[in-house]
């Protein structure tokens, strides 16, 4: 229950983060917001964890993979921060939620994992729901929707890499390096996009972005450290509800019938896939032959 509570709290943080990014984007460059988000995480994690863990926090067996993971997440943040400026928060989050289905697709293509026909049907259903959300020929389709889909595939690659690294790497060490890779790379391009923060309200919103990103990912680590992933995954879809609530409270936006149908289809396919995974993980291993 504690793991589930941490995960639900993390999804609420991510919904607030996306909503705040959409608000801040009207006043300041999105790339400045990306930079602030990663610098906040890097400094906060270092200040909090380094005194507790010492040099052990820096130990990694795969420094190149740590850098690659940081680059992938920075790319995800950049794509998502731009895409959410032009899409409603709820619909954007629904697109993000097809990521577990894309992980299934990438695992079959690149890792040669066997995928049963039912899982392929769920992947197809999730993409059909995504098409309903972006509404080909409608108002939100275009380069912003393409950015959201690019972000989903990048995020799926990030998740696959994370699952491989988690077998040998400390989660907090991964969190530490992810923050610093993002902070250093975004700092390198900052002079090209820098603009002064216009007022104290915008600065407070930037701090909120950094705080929600840092706390959200830390809660995510705590959740997966305490509860099996197959148990937690269905609860990830709570984020769509939080995002729709934030979109309604802040932007007075309510999804239409077609978008709502697409969101429901994404949740149904994703939750069913998670249930199948949980059932497979509970299945006892075959007895050894003697």
Image (spheres, grey):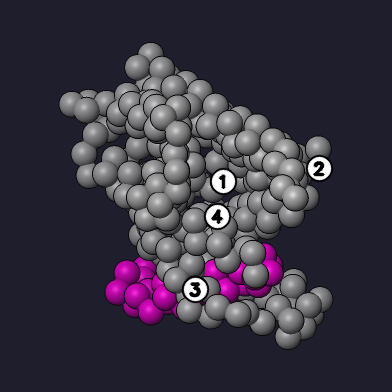
* Residue 261 versus residue 105 in the image, above or below: above
Check disc 1 and report the residue beneath it: 14
Check disc 3 and report the residue beneath it: 65
Q: Nearer the viewer, mark 1 or mark 3?
A: 3
Quarter assignment of residue 57: bottom right
Residues at marks 3 and 2, CA–CA distance in whole angstroms: 30 Å
Of all residues, the one furthest to the top in this rendering is: 257
Q: Nearer the viewer, mark 1 or mark 2?
A: 2
Q: Is residue 249 magenta?
A: no
Q: Nearer the viewer, mark 3 or mark 4?
A: 3
The picture places residue 179, in percent across and down from the top left corner, at 56, 69
Q: Can residue 96 be seen by looking at this rendering?
A: no
The total number of labels drawn is 4
Report if the CB atoms under discs 2 and 4 are less than 8 Å apart: no
Start and end of the magenta stretch?
Answer: 169-198
Q: Nearer the viewer, mark 3 or mark 2?
A: 3
Check disc 4 and report the residue beneath it: 209
The picture places residue 287, in percent across and down from the top left corner, at 74, 43
Left or right: where does residue 234 sit relative to residue 247?
A: right
Residues at marks 1 and 2, CA–CA distance in whole angstroms: 19 Å
**Residue at point 55%, 62% (across, down):** 164
Q: Is residue 173 magenta?
A: yes
Pointer 1 or 3: first along the chain? 1
Of all residues, the one furthest to the left in this rendering is: 137
Report if the CB atoms under discs 3 and 4 are less than 8 Å apart: no
Left or right: where does residue 258 sit relative to residue 41?
A: left
Pointer 3 or 2: first along the chain? 2
């Amino acid at each position: 229950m504690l793991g589930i509570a941490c995960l639900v709290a993390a999804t609420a943080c991510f919904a607030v983060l996306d909503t705040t990014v959409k608000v801040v984007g009207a006043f300041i460059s999105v790339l400045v917001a990306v930079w602030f988000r990663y610098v906040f995480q890097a400094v906060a994690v270092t200040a909090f964890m380094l005194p507790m863990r010492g040099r052990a926090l820096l130990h990694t067996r795969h420094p190149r993979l740590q850098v690659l993971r940081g680059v992938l997440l920075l790319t995800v943040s950049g794509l998502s921060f731009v895409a959410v400026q032009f899409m409603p928060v709820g619909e954007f989050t629904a697109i993000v939620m097809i990521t577990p289905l894309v992980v299934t697709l990438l695992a079959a293509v690149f890792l040669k994992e066997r995928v049963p026909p039912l899982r392929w049907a769920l992947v197809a259903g999730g993409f059909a729901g995504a098409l309903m959300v972006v509404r080909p020929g409608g108002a939100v389709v275009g380069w912003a929707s393409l950015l959201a889909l690019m972000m989903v595939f990048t995020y799926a690659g990030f998740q696959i890499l994370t699952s491989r690294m988690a077998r040998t790497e400390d989660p907090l060490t991964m969190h530490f390096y992810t923050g610093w890779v993002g902070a250093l790379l975004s700092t390198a391009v900052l002079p090209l996009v820098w603009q002064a923060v216009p007022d104290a309200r915008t600065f407070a919103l930037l701090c909120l972005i950094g705080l929600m990103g840092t706390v959200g990912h830390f809660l995510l680590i705590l959740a997966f450290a305490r509860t099996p992933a197959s148990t937690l995954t269905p609860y990830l879809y709570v984020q769509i509800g939080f995002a729709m609530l934030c979109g309604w409270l802040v932007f007075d936006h309510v999804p239409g019938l077609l978008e709502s149908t697409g969101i429901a289809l994404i949740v149904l396919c994703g939750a069913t896939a998670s249930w199948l995974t949980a059932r497979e993980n509970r299945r006892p291993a075959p007895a050894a032959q003697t």
